Amino acid sequence: MKPEFAELSVLNQISHVLVHQRNVSSLLKEVLDIMKEQMGFHRATLTMRRGDLLIIEASNGLSEEEKKRGQYKIGEGVTGRVAASGKARIIPDIASEPEFLDKTKARKSARLAFICVPIVSPEEGVIGTLSIDHPKADEHDLKKVRDFLTILANILADAVGAFRAEIEEKDLLRAENERLRRELGDKFRPGNIVGNCSSMKLVYTMIAQVSDSPATVLIRGESGTGKELVAKAIHYASSRKSSSFVAVNCAALPETLVESELFGHEKGAFTGAVQQRKGRFEVAAGGTLFLDEIGDISLAVQVKLLRVLQERVFERVGGQEPIQSNVRIIAATSRNLEKEMQECRFREDLYYRLNIFPIHLPALKERKSDIILLADHFLSKYNGMYSKKIKRISTPAINMMMMYHWPGNVRELENCIERAVLVSGDDVINAHDLPPSLQTAQATGTEIIPLEGANFHTMVRSYERELIVDSLKNNRGNVAAASRALGLTKRIMHYKITNIGIDVSNFK
């Protein structure tokens, strides 16, 4: 202890911090800094009890990595025994004390004493410890420091207790949020969607969050991922479920008819308009309008659609009477709208109106854990539709489906299972019942024969490509395994993959 150390001076500074510092974490750190400056020790540590562990919550002289290492079970080492017994300990020389574990690995010099006192709450007992590394000194001086640390620990008990309660409350809240998130993922999983992977559970949670609001939703994902199913799930979980769900595929309509289809037209508005016709916005009044492939509509229609979203009013083609729109908009697209905006094919203002609540649907190759679940679902569906009694899918067929990259996503998988159900001659779907696109040379025993008329280089390149693609399929996109199967080095394999232009991610 420094000769000039004055207990009253330290207590005065600490009491000032206790009065003015409202952030408990900062308060504890400031107190330790005052102690180190006034008392002349090497480092100070304040641990807090969390269940059966003591965890460092404030310190000086310790790095973040050292703090993480400094965790003690109750009864473990000097610090753990102080917490277990509720009695202070003085270790005159840490080098000769086997109970001193130095878990932080922060002691570069062994010529140190160690003093640890308990922080005691009248209601909860020991809630933490306060300890310091002190230069070696005689027993009288160390006992004097211990007694002063005990006074400080009593003063800090309320602050430590409040901080501990705050942390426990946050932990409970975090645990409750996680529990609710899991429950919501199960409770609100729409009956029309199959999938249990983490990315789909996030989709279910988002559906539950947005369903009962009037917010516009933009569903994004590759073709065949089930965007319309998500739109229907949102509609039928909302307060509009008793009204119409109207779906429009914007990409399937001729550009000249999109406006008429959406907003309707008056008699005589154009050649062939022999009578007034309501558009989809009117048909869906009170319900939900699903605009699929919204990225395919023309700029002229985008302007009119923007007005409906902003003003909730529109006119039929050839009409002048404004019609109020009471319809919830859900849009979907497989296009990269950000790129479309950069190339001036999609309006930024419309994008921001649609993108209020975006939902991203993962591609099937990103949710391979759901492939078997989906395959079983479609097997049951088409068993009933075609009066079949197929009981299972064989292991080789499952392996083929797991190795395939599914560019057509869930829609392609459904078509694949439907075909297999139709062609299967027994109660099992075998590998040979699957479409040719899923077959590999390994499974079929076929050899690759180049087309006649091709030149030497074309045939070699084609043959190389097929060999590499088949090997990648067989090894699920593992380049190292595929190169070993072909007798190539990994470096040459990477060179050929790059040179030929093969996307390895398609096979993972």
Image: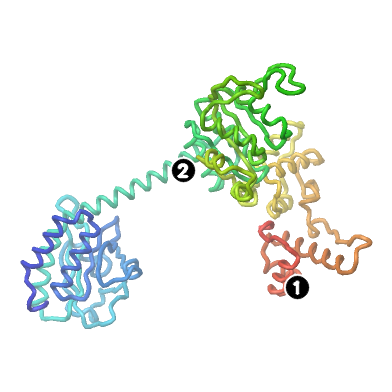
* Pick the front one: 151 or 496: 496
Callout 1 amino acid: Gly
- For the C terminus, the image quarter is bottom right
What secondary structure is found at the residue carrying circle 2?
helix
Residue under the image location 74 percent in, 69 percent down:
496
Vertical arrangement, residue 140 with respect to residue 259, above or below: below
In percent of width and height, residue 206 lies at 50, 40
Residue 83 figure quarter: bottom left
In percent of width and height, residue 186 lies at 50, 39
The residue beneath circle 2 is 182
The answer for how far apart the CA atoms under marks 1 and 2 are is: 47 Å
Q: Residues within 10 Å of mark 1 (few under 14, many from 20)?
A: few
What secondary structure is found at the residue carrying circle 1?
loop
Q: Is residue 19 visible?
A: yes
Q: Is residue 456 left or right of residue 326?
A: right
In percent of width and height, residue 156 lies at 16, 58
Callout 2 amino acid: Arg
Vertical arrangement, residue 319 with respect to residue 391, above or below: above
Identify the mark nearer the N-term, 1 or 2: 2
Q: How many marks?
A: 2
* Pick the front one: 174 or 319: 319
What numbered label is drawn on residue 487? 1
Residue under the image location 19 percent in, 71 percent down:
132
Residue 227 figure quarter: top right
Vertical arrangement, residue 95 with respect to residue 222, above or below: below
In percent of width and height, residue 125 lies at 18, 55
